[in-house]
Amino acid sequence: MLTRRNTLILSSGLGLALCSFAGGYVASIHLHSTLPEMVRAQRLQPPGDATPDVRQGVLATLQEFQAGYVARNPGELDQFMAQLFDPNVDTLALGTEGATNEWARGYAPVKSFIQRDWQYWGDLRLDVEHADVWAMGDIAWVATDGAVHFARSKRPLRFTAILTREGNHWIFRQMQFQWDDSEPSDGDVLHGRTYLRLLELGRQ
């Protein structure tokens, strides 16, 4: 038979366990281990082996891509796709998550992929100026850092892509977004810095 004292102890234990679980859950959503900005910037040096004119052309396409993700104008999506993709070639876009729609192959699926990003994702910002660009003939591949800005936080990511030249313009054939951090461990729940970080996020 439970006494009042035992009931209080049991309730306190359950409350503590619930708080620990909630804290760990929130931390897993908002806290990630990231590389220092200086280390991330050093990865983009040297800037690849593309000739200056090829680099300029590839970065122009990358800048158009970035501008579309900043504007997020559904009325401009068709024009965005026509400028940066070819409906007559096989195209692949890979997202950061494991969902089925994060693997889009073909012009129409890639268009839907980008439309969802514009509607539901955070504010994507890529380091276009310092992107690494390599090239061989009419094929170029690019890698750069960036971040997705949310209402109260941002999360770093890597962006890589393969492009081909059509006339004087470069178009995307494959692109991939990948988070550039690691998930918090179970042990992070026991550290005070975890909750200090959550307080910082709450003030943003």
Image (spheres, rainbow, N blue to C red):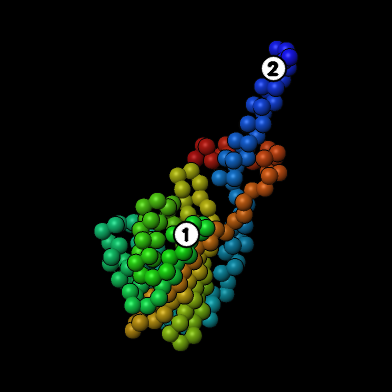
In space, the residues marked 2 and 1 are separated at their CA atoms by: 47 Å
The structure residue drawn at horizontal position 46% and vertical position 69%, both measured from the top left corner, is 175
Is residue 119 visible to us here?
yes
Q: Left or right? Give the position of 15 relative to 108.
A: right
User: Among all residues in the image, which is located at the extreme top?
Assistant: 4
Amino acid type at mark 2: Thr
Q: Left or right? Give the position of 189 relative to 85.
A: right
Where, by quadrant of the figure, is residue 181 drawn?
Answer: bottom right
Is residue 131 visible to us here?
no
What x and y, as percent, mark residue 96?
51, 59
**Label 2: which secondary element:** helix
Where, by quadrant of the figure, is residue 40 drawn?
Answer: bottom right
Q: Of residues 39 and 160, which is closer to you in this image?
A: 160
What x and y, as percent, mark residue 58?
42, 75
Local packing at callout 2 (Cα closer than 10 Å; few below 14, some 14-19, many 20+) is: few
User: Among all residues in the image, which is located at the extreme bottom?
Assistant: 137
Which disc, if any, is residue 100?
Answer: 1
Q: Left or right? Give the position of 78 relative to 1.
A: left
The structure residue drawn at horizontal position 35% and vertical position 82%, both measured from the top left corner, is 166
The residue that mark 2 highlights is: 7
Residue 130, compared with residue 54, is above or below; it is above
**Label 1: which secondary element:** helix
Q: Left or right? Give the position of 158 relative to 114.
A: right
The mark tally for this picture is 2
